[in-house]
Image (cartoon, rainbow, N blue to C red):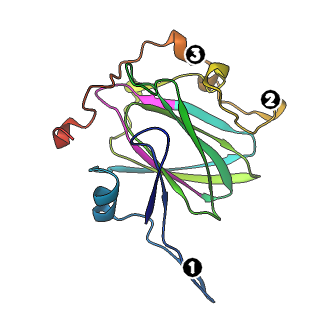
Amino acid sequence: MEVIKTDIEGVVIIEPRIFNDARGYFFESFSQREFEEKVRRVNFVQDNESMSAYGVMRGLHFQMPPFTQSKLVRCVKGRVLDVAVDIRKGSPTFGKHVAVELSEDNHRQFFVPRGFAHGFAVLSDVAVFQYKCDNFYAPQADSGISICDTSLGIDWMIPADKVILSEKDTKHPLLDEFDSPFEYSTNLYPEFGPQ
């Protein structure tokens, strides 16, 4: 796999090596060994999948400490714009984001570390989205910032009259109204010691 660094340290795009022939294609979608060699140590414990129609925007989600999660995400059908926003207080990139298109054609994956809010917008008629998490879902820790926060400068590529949001996602605060519990200097992966 090829790891593509982004403008925010720790947030990376992963391109697998694809083997095509007359039958179709094959690729290794995840290797613990290679991921830890090229990205970071991580222990994924839960896989999730969602299906959404065009215009659906989900996010910007995260879990509050001590239930924080990293996510390794991909789109296995259709096309999405996937976004990670740095919400670590004191970070030189606080409030900045990385956006990447994930699709069934490019097979890209996107690693969103702990301390980031995550969301995506569906750009195709239908999208099936999969993600691995390194901590279990904890409903009491479920949180988010507004996916419609214009101060973040995200172009979601969806006309305003086509956006579909859950009721929950309409109620998240703007970033400047949110007192982030994430600190840039804090080790967000204590189970692995200092990194």
Does dot 3 land on a helix, a strand or a loop? loop
Residue 76, horizontal then vertical, whole percent = 59, 60
The earlier-in-sequence mark between 1 and 3 is: 1
Which residue is at the front of the view, 105 or 122?
Answer: 105
Say which quadrant the C terminus sits in: top left
| Three-letter residue code for mark 2 | Ala
Residue sitting at 84 percent across and 30 percent down? 161
| Neighbour tally class for label 3: few under 14, some 14-19, many 20 plus, Cα within 10 Å | some
**Distance (Cα) linking label 1 and label 3:** 43 Å
> Element type at marker 1?
strand
Q: Is residue 32 magenta?
A: no
Which disc, if any, is residue 25? 1
Residue drawn 37% across the image and 32% down it: 138
At mark 2, the secondary structure is helix
Relative image position of residue 25 (x, y in whole percent):
57, 79
The extreme top residue here reads 177
Q: Is residue 111 above or below residue 87?
A: below
Q: Which range is magenta? A: 61-75
The residue to which callout 3 is attached is 174
Q: CA distance from mark 1 to mark 2?
A: 37 Å
The spot of residue 185 in percent (x, y) is: 28, 25
Under mark 3, the amino acid is Leu
For residue 50, which numbered disc appears in the image? none
Q: Earlier in the sequence, mark 2 or mark 3?
A: 2
Q: Which residue is mark 2?
A: 160
> How far across and how far down the image is residue 139, in percent?
41, 29
How far separated are the C-alphas under marks 2 and 3? 18 Å
Tell which of 136 and 85 is nearer to you. 85
> Residue 142 lies in what quarter of the image?
top left
Query: Quarter of the image holding residue 170?
Result: top right
Q: Amino acid at mark 1?
A: Tyr
